[in-house]
Amino acid sequence: MAVREQEQAQPAERAAARRLGVLRQAALASTLLVGVLGGVAVWRAVDRLDDAWGRHAVVQGEMADLKAVIGARLNEAVGVVGLDSGSPTDDPELQAQLDEVFEWAGTRDAALGEDVIAREAELVDAAEASGAVDERLLFRLESTLRELDRQVTRPTSEAAQAAHDDARYTVVVVVVLSAGLGGAAAWLGRRLRAQEAPAGNEPTPHRT
């Protein structure tokens, strides 16, 4: 009777073992798929992060170059007091550098750009006439440059921070999914081995 019941139970056990085997293979395949796709997603997120921070750094560098151009023109103006050096507003280098700032920032405030050029010209004109830097005019120019700096670097900084958050979220999702699927595959593997263990390996009680 016991032998017959055991024989009847074997097909059900084998079917359960097959189901566990299929589930385990599916979990392993899903883990591999998530690993591959997750790796691609992480790589793309990191690439976007690198591009965003690189763009932000370039904008900062272009702003530094713009200030260097203004500083060089101001120093030149102080050194040529009393000479006719031409109109400082006719400086293609300053306009070109300002265009570079706006181009890399991906934004353009024409009025603010004109303010920078006008106040720089006003300061350089005064320096050429007096041989000294007018602190009031310098303060006005510096205020305009700070506003320009804020306008062109804020969007790139925000874009870089958004890319950073996106990359961090992508990594967390990929790690959690991979760990969950890997754990499921390991658990199914243990269940499958327990199902396939031969009955003869089970310990029998010792009779005295």
Image: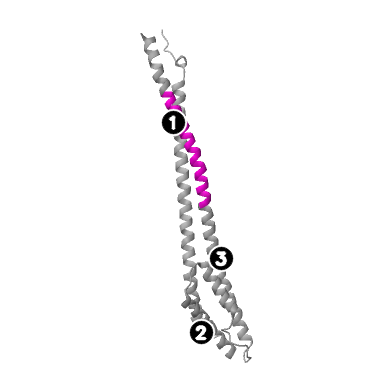
Query: From mark 2 to mark 1, how far is it between C-alphas?
Result: 76 Å
Tell me: 59 left or right of 206: right
Q: Position of residue 27 (x, y in %)?
A: 46, 34
Marked residue nearer the N-terminal end (1 or 3): 1
Judge depth for marks 1 and 3 and give the one in front. Answer: 1
Number of on-image labels:
3
Determine which residue is flagged by label 2. Answer: 137
Above-or-below relation of 194 to 92 = above
Asked whether residue 40 is drawn in magenta, I would say yes
Judge depth for marks 2 and 3 and give the one in front. Answer: 3
**Quarter of the picture holding the C terminus:** top left
Q: Secondary structure at mark 2?
A: helix
Q: Label 3: how many residues lie within 10 Å, few (<14), some (14-19) or many (20+)?
A: some
Name the residue located 41 percent from the left edge and 22 percent from the top edge. Answer: 15
Name the residue located 47 percent from the left edge and 24 percent from the top edge. Answer: 193
Q: Which residues are magenta?
A: 16-44
Tag shown at residue 23: 1
Q: Label 2: how many residues lie within 10 Å, few (<14), some (14-19) or many (20+)?
A: some
Q: Secondary structure at mark 1?
A: helix
Q: Position of residue 74 (x, y in %)?
A: 59, 82
Asked whether residue 60 is drawn in magenta, I would say no
Q: Secondary structure at mark 3?
A: helix
Judge depth for marks 2 and 1 and give the one in front. Answer: 1
Q: Amino acid at mark 1?
A: Leu
Q: Position of residue 164 (x, y in %)?
A: 48, 56
Q: Amino acid at mark 2?
A: Leu
Q: Position of residue 191 (x, y in %)?
A: 43, 26
Marked residue nearer the N-terminal end (2 or 1): 1
Query: From mark 2 to mark 3, how far is it between C-alphas?
Result: 28 Å
